[in-house]
Image: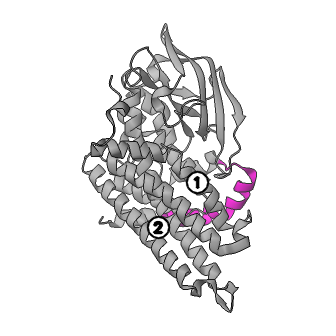
Amino acid sequence: MKFTQEHEEIRRTMKRFIDAEINPHVDAWEEAEQFPAHEVFKKLGDLGMLGLTKPEAYGGAALDYSYAMVFAETLGQIRCGGVPMAIGVQTDMATPALARFGSDELRKEFLAPAIAGDYVACIGVSEPGAGSDVASIKTTARKDGGDYVINGAKMWITNSLQADWMCLLANTSEGAAHKNKTLIILPMKTKGVTVAKKIRKIGMMSSDTGLIHFDDVRVPQRYRIGEEGMGFTYQMQQFQEERLWAAARSVLGLTRTINDTIEYIRERKMFGQTVLDFQYVHYRLAELKTEVEALRALTYRACEMYVAGEDVTELASMAKLKAGRLSREVSDSCLQYWGGMGYTWDNPVSRAYRDGRLGSIGGGADEVMLGIICKYMGILPSRYVKKD
């Protein structure tokens, strides 16, 4: 990819912001198991960073996705996984469908303040019994007069303890699982919305995650995003950006883990030499760095195709698969070279180890990515291809 002066300015602006406003506080936020999303998002909104690809009419910059990719990649400078993930939910997971398909009224009410950083958004897809299998969600939204009445639950919802609104996927009719779902904007303070539980995770500590219940929650039907019954399709389109975002965000974090490890083992002595001097170790680190650069190249290629208007579902799935697996491989290999220090909690490599494990689960598990890739290759057994 060829980057312009504008791309580089986004990198510089975000690097300064991360160094001044985020990294000095990361350890405290990790300890508190939450970061101040409204405060951080408002500062990002003031910088114009929350709507790079969104329409100008609602406060966005109307740039192509390559600028969002540079933004996501630079978030890898943050010394934890939870804060970048929360930002990515706001920019690339909860808002793309609203920006594309929402009514003008809906975009003014919810998208514009999300771009400004005045509202925090979350995405409500996963449920206690349906994670990667999006078609199996059970939450319903039935029509009653001019409203939808929502019942059900959503689980593993990032930002949900602080969110002002949720982009909710719900079943609005009976029938085929890929044609009965609708995306609906749900204000989180609506009567009947309950934060049932704050979920404590093994990583991504600074990002709040909730189990949310809906008991006869009423929202006006005008809060529907786009056409009724198109929610599954819209969500699959949102997944393209989410998965590209995940791959782009991983690159600098993986590189940092390798560099942190080199710095540490350059000084760590074993058997009369530094750990870095062992041939197996420096060869292995060179191998890992090569894999990270291959991921970067794949992500850049997918981004170029996406900007050109091509379907990148296959490449985005490959990039997301590779990013998740490399997050596990790099952190595990590097932790080994830290020895006992790698197994302590307050350590950059152990944090990367904990945070990175989610990459092969969230946004579609590795197995789902492999299924998508096989489908595009024409080798998925027919019994797995859903027919409506």
Residue 304 position in % (x across, y down): 29, 56
Looking at the image, the residue that sits furthest to the bottom is 272
Query: Which of the pair 384/35 is nearer the observer?
Result: 384
Foreground label between 2 and 1 = 1
Residue shown at the point (75%, 55%) measured from the top left: 31
Side (left or right) of 23 relative to 279:
right
Query: Which of the pair 129/166 is nearer the observer?
Result: 129
Q: Is residue 98 visible?
A: yes
Q: Amino acid at mark 1?
A: Arg
User: What distance separates the C-alpha of mark 2 from that of mark 1?
Assistant: 29 Å
Q: Based on the displayed image, in which of its 4 quarters is residue 165 positioned?
A: top right
Label 1 CA crowd tier, 10 Å (few <14, some 14–19, many 20+):
many
Residue position marked by numbered label 1 in the rendering: 357
Residue shown at the point (61%, 52%) measured from the top left: 82
Q: Amino acid at mark 2?
A: Arg
Residue shown at the point (25%, 47%) measured from the top left: 310
Residue position marked by numbered label 2 in the rendering: 12
Label 2 CA crowd tier, 10 Å (few <14, some 14–19, many 20+):
few
Side (left or right) of 187 relative to 12:
right
Q: Which residues are magenta?
A: 13-36
Q: Secondary structure at mark 1?
A: helix
Q: Main secondary structure of the magenta part?
A: helix
Decide: is 261 above or below 118: below
Residue shown at the point (73%, 58%) measured from the top left: 28
Residue 290 lies within the magenta run: no
Side (left or right) of 147 relative to 305:
right
Decide: is 365 above or below 248: above
Residue 27 position in % (x across, y down): 71, 61
Q: Secondary structure at mark 2?
A: helix
